[in-house]
Amino acid sequence: MSGTAVVLGVGPGLGMSIAHRFGREGYRVVLVSRSASRHPDYLAALAAAGVQAGSHTADVRDAGSLRAALDEIGRVDVLYYGPASAGISPVPITETSSDDVREAMSWVLPAVDAVGAVLPGMVERGSGGLLFAGGLSSVVPMPPLGNLAVSSAALRNYALTLNAALAGTGVYAGALTIGGLIERGDIHRMMTAQPELLGDLSAHTLDPDGIADAAWELYTKRDRAEEVFNALG
């Protein structure tokens, strides 16, 4: 067994692909999300693939709930942070208020809380990894996304700055910067269910298994701090 990989914000798309990828490498996987309703199916799928896994219910925006879940899990060797900013509507950048940005940042601050909980142990052991999934608007100007672009940029910068700070410690930090609909994910299912409203999105999708492979490569090779995926053209 290689250790424990925690997937924060697990969903049927990328989160589960990350779980399968690290589980295939011998990691015990722990899934964390706001609702436990889908955990049994997720755990069954992982068990069928030979992956040892467990789950916890916690809203990452509730610092106490998040810390309690991580404390109960115990030693964390790899932390993947990928909760979606569900319920937050994008506001065009020319109309974005500080309140809009503050709301969007509510999905970034938990990343800092999570790192604060697991990083000291990683540094003490001289091993571990931190992976963060964010949006392409952090590197490509997308004015309609406004407030979400600001928060995406903040998360990316946090990951890259951690990467620089942790050089030589044995702990890796990296960013998965994603532009496109992730296949099998909740947003992908919602948008493709309404083709009459949104048009053909097939050219703008990304395979979550491919992204998970890239996450594994980032973590193991440690030769760069970021991988960018752009299906938007």
Image (cartoon, rainbow, N blue to C red):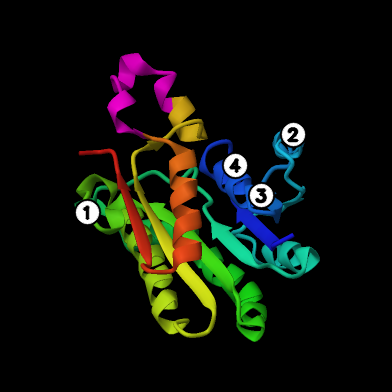
Which of pointers 1 and 3 indicates the residue nearer the eye?
3
Residue 79 on image: x %, y %: 59, 63
Camera-side residue: 27 or 78?
27
| SS class, disc 2 | helix
| SS class, disc 1 | loop
The residue wearing badge 1 is: 140
Residue 185 on image: x %, y %: 50, 34
Please give the range of residues in magenta.
191-205
Residue 42 on image: x %, y %: 70, 37
Residue 171 on image: x %, y %: 54, 76
Sequence-earlier tag: 1 or 4: 4
Is residue 199 shown in magenta?
yes
- Residue type at mark 1: give it: Val
What separation in Å lies between label 1 and label 2 (alpha carbons)? 39 Å
Q: Which label belongs to residue 23?
A: 3
- Residue type at mark 2: give it: Ala
Say whether marks 2 and 4 touch (CB < 8 Å): no
What separation in Å lies between label 4 and label 3 (alpha carbons)? 10 Å
Sequence-earlier tag: 2 or 3: 3
- Residue type at mark 3: give it: Gly
What separation in Å lies between label 1 and label 3 (alpha carbons)? 33 Å
The residue wearing badge 2 is: 48
Q: Which label belongs to residue 16?
A: 4
